[in-house]
Image (cartoon, grey):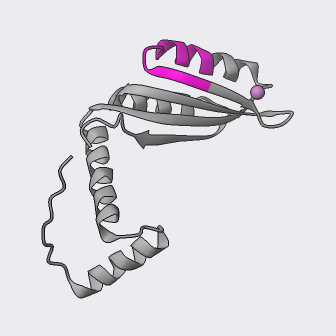
Amino acid sequence: MALVRFGVSIEKGLLSKFDRFIKERKYTNRSEAFRDLVRRELVSEQWQGNAEVSGAITLVYDHHKRELVNKLMDIQHDFGKLIISSQHIHLDHDNCLEIIAVKGESRQAQKLADSLNSVKGVKHATLSMSATGKGI
Ligand code: NI
């Protein structure tokens, strides 16, 4: 992809904050940091606009609660087309960590994450909103 250079006018104070941000995040130059900020906004827009996205849902729960495990399984089967991979890790005697990778419409991914999160007994759930890499 061809690179284009362009000038940006920005308040001195804001630029100082940007440079501090760049340093904290270990960027070596402003351009790379700026590109990532733009891409982050584009990915956010993809999620808001129901575009095709990818992401990961993580769940922590106690597997001794059989009804909970069955419910989580039922929900995942309902979203079979969306789920591209899942991994189950036995954290300790009681707790399980499940990582569910998804690819598809953002609204469906959000719906799956909400459905899993709202099952009684799920201790913690997160949805990492990422991209397919296209359009960014
Ligand atoms: Ni387990």
* Camera-nearest residue between 28 and 33: 28
The magenta region covers 72-86
Q: In this view, does 24 lie above or below 115?
A: below
**Can residue 44 be seen by looking at this rendering?**
yes
* Residue lying farthest to the right in this orientation: 93
* Residue lying farthest to the front in this orientation: 2
Query: Residue 130's x, y, as percent?
Result: 40, 41
Residue 80 painted magenta? yes
* Camera-nearest residue between 81 and 12: 12
Q: Would you identify the image quadrant in which residue 93 lies? A: top right
Residue 127 painted magenta? no
Query: Residue 85's x, y, as percent?
Result: 54, 22
89 displayed left or right of 72: right
Q: Which residue is drawn at 47% across and 67% down?
A: 25
37 displayed left or right of 83: left
**Can residue 118 be seen by looking at this rendering?**
no
Query: Residue 22's x, y, as percent?
Result: 40, 71
The quarter of the rendered structure image containing the C terminus is: top left
Q: In this view, does 45 lie above or below 80?
A: below
Instruction: Give ligand 1's quarter of the image.
Output: top right
Query: Residue 70's x, y, as percent?
Result: 66, 16
Tally the numbered discs. 0
85 displayed left or right of 136: right
120 displayed left or right of 16: right
* Camera-nearest residue between 121 and 100: 100
Q: Residue at x 31, y 70 (%)?
A: 30
Q: Which residue is drawn at 20% across and 83% down?
A: 11
* Residue lying farthest to the bottom in this orientation: 12
Q: In this view, does 112 lie above or below 127?
A: above
Q: Residue at x 76, y 24 (%)?
A: 65
